Each structure stands twice: as C-alpha cells, then as structure tokens.
Image (cartoon, helix red, strand yellow):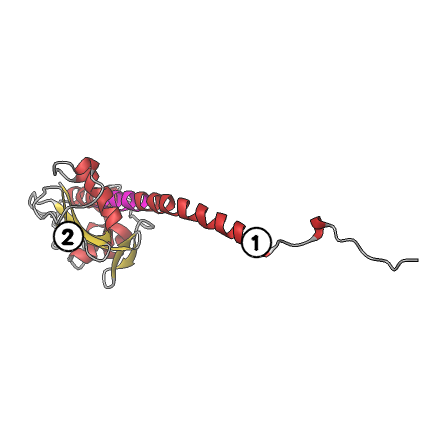
Amino acid sequence: MLPYAPSFNRSLRGFTLMEMLVIIAIIGVLAAIMLPKLQGSSYVASAKQVDEFFNASANNWRLANQTCGTSTDVAGSTLVASPSAANSLGLIINGSAYLNGAYQGCYNSSGVVPLIGKATGNPTDGFRVGGYLVSWSGGGGGIPITFSVTVPTDIAIILYRQYSSASGARNATSLPGGDATDQKFRFTNPSGGNTTVTYFVY
C-alpha cells in the first residue's frame, strides 16, 4: 500500500509573489488616477467654504450694526465691547460674548445668527476657516469690508476664476503674477504652493 500523499488544491493556496505585485500595481494605478480628482473636489469645497464665510460675515456685521445704529467699521464699532477687528470677527463667529451689553436688545432683534461651526479660533490666536487663518478690515463710511487669507494656490485659482475682473480669469488654469489693483479680488504672487488673497465685500 502506498503512503498517503495529500493533494494540494490550488484554491486553498495563498497568492504568489507575482500575483501580489500585480495587485499592488493595480491599486497604485487606481490611486494615481483618483487622487488628483479627490484633491480637486477638496479644493472646490474649501474655496466655497471660504467664499460663503466672507459673504455671510460681512452681511451679518452690516445687519447687526445697522439695526443698532452703530458704525460698520470692523475695527472701531462700539457694537463690540472692546472694539477691534479681531473682536468684531469674534462677535460674528461666536455671538454675544464679544457684544457691548448696551446693544444686547437691538442685536437680538437683528436676527443675526453667529457663524459658530463655520470658523474656529479666537481673537488672540486668530480665526481659521477651513483651516486657513483669516482677517478682516475696513467696513466704515462706505469702505468695503476686506478679507485676507493665505490658501493653497489651487484654492486661490478657483476664487480668481469666480471674482477677478482680469481678462481671461474665468478660464484660467493658473494664477498670473500677483494682482494688487482689482476692485473685488487681489492676490500675491504664488510662493511655496500658497497665495495670499484679498477679497472685497461691498
């Protein structure tokens, strides 16, 4: 009688080294194809988040001050307990913690809803929208409210296409050198993958 010799069924064996290398190569190719698309979607979402924050902040600030009869100057309005650009942004983001108590009634009646969750931070360390540090200025006496933020250049390009009045901006695939004259959207020359943009809300 012959000794028992087990037969090995191929379906019970693991992958060979060659099969594993092929699978890894396929995953790598798929990742290389999908990553730019995912990053592009992320940039579009971040640009939208920044844009919406700028407009909502400016609108809420003006509405609260008009209701209370105070100045819309973000650095000097007495609507804020300790007037400064940082504290006025704190009022718009976090609500009445930064409010001058004398205006509590009119502030409440303005219907302004703090932008909690739209930004993080505080007046001392600064506020961030989508992870990017923002600041604002202006706003008094017919002066537009000006926002500044340093973002990846890919986000700046999206905002540039939407707001710049420069010829060819709508179809731009890259930022030209900086623009310090546009009435709505200005930016610095890209450096290290980032660009500082300045956005005006009239």
Q: Is residue 154 visible?
A: yes
Residue located at (17% from left, 43% from top): 62
What number is the disc on residue 69? none
SS at circle 2 = loop
Image position, residue 34 (x, y; %): 41, 44
- Quarter of the image for residue 49 reads top left
Image position, residue 1 (x, y; %): 93, 58
Direction front: furthest residue: 2
SS at circle 1 = helix
Q: Earlier in the sequence, mark 1 or mark 2?
A: 1
Q: Amino acid at mark 1?
A: Met
What is the count of numbered marks? Answer: 2
Up the image or down, 157 lies above or below 3; here it is: above
Would residue 37 be counted in the magenta stretch? no
Residue located at (23% from left, 54% from top): 194
Image position, residue 191 (x, y; %): 19, 56
According to the picture, the residue beneath numbered tag 1 turns out to be: 18
According to the picture, the residue beneath numbered tag 2 turns out to be: 189
Mark 2 surroundings within 10 Å by alpha-carbon count, few (fewer than 14), some (14 through 19), many (20 or more): some
Would residue 47 be counted in the magenta stretch? yes
Nearest to the observer: residue 149 or residue 60: 149
Residue located at (29% from left, 48% from top): 115
In-image side of 107 versus 7 (left or right): left
Direction bottom: furthest residue: 124
Q: Is residue 55 visible?
A: no
Nearest to the observer: residue 88 or residue 149: 149
The chief SS type of the magenta part is helix
Image: magenta residue range: 45-57
Q: Amino acid at mark 2?
A: Asn
In-image side of 34 versus 155 (left or right): right
Question: In 3D space, how far apart are the residues under numbered discs 1 and 2 (Cα atoms)?
Answer: 48 Å
In-image side of 128 versus 24 (left or right): left
